[in-house]
Amino acid sequence: MNSIQPAFSEGSASETARRIDSVAWAAFFIWVGIAMLMGVPWDWFLVGVGVLTLAAQFFHWSMDNKVDLFWIACGVAFLAGGVWMLLQFPWPLAPILIILLGIVLLSKALR
């Protein structure tokens, strides 16, 4: 007897999510290696990490997988910090955003 299964069953959704995460981590390590070899400045490095992080979450969303708000917050912080440094504004946004993100995570963990 033939059974009809949905195109995206529970198992395939988790497999898709795992593949997206694996590709994202691979791209991250490739970016870190390129940045180290080429001497990429911090501002462009942060922009690259932010773009990779947000792209991974976009692909999760486009494949109807669960989007992780933590990684969206990290991606926005990295991207905003890198752009802030590129624009050479007088006070350092990236460290402030990362510290604030850490404080929010710590407060959630201690509740």
Image (cartoon, rainbow, N blue to C red):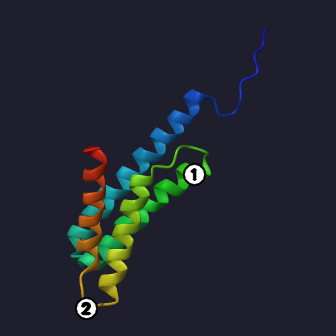
Q: Position of residue 87 (x, y in %)?
A: 34, 89
Vertical comparison of 88 with 75: above or below: below
Q: Name the residue: 24% across, 86% down.
A: 91
Residue lying at 21% horizontally and 69% vertically, measured from the top left? 37
Question: Is residue 7 left or right of 106 when viewed as pictured?
Answer: right
Residue where numbered disc 2 is placed: 90
Q: Quadrant of the C terminus?
A: top left
Percent of width and height locating residue 72: 43, 59
Q: Is residue 58 above or below residue 76?
A: above
Q: Is residue 48 visible?
A: no
Label 1 amino acid? Answer: Trp
Give the image location of residue 29, x and y in percent.
30, 56
Q: CA distance from mark 1 to mark 2?
A: 35 Å
Q: Where does label 1 land, which residue?
A: 61
The residue tagged with tag 2: helix, strand or loop?
loop
- The residue lying at 27 percent from left, 45 percent from top is 109
Q: Amino acid at mark 2?
A: Pro
From the viewer's perspective, tell me whether residue 105 is left or right of residue 75: left
Nearer to us: label 1 or label 2: 2
Closest to the observer, 18 or 10? 10
Most foreground residue, 1 or 103: 103
Q: Quadrant of the N terminus?
A: top right
Residue 102 found in image quarter: bottom left
Of the numbered discs 1 and 2, the one sitting upstream in the chain is 1
Outermost residue, right side: 1
Instruction: Name the secondary structure under disc 1.
Output: helix
In the displayed structure image, the side of residue 84 where residue 106 appears, left or right: left
Residue located at (28% from left, 65% from top): 100
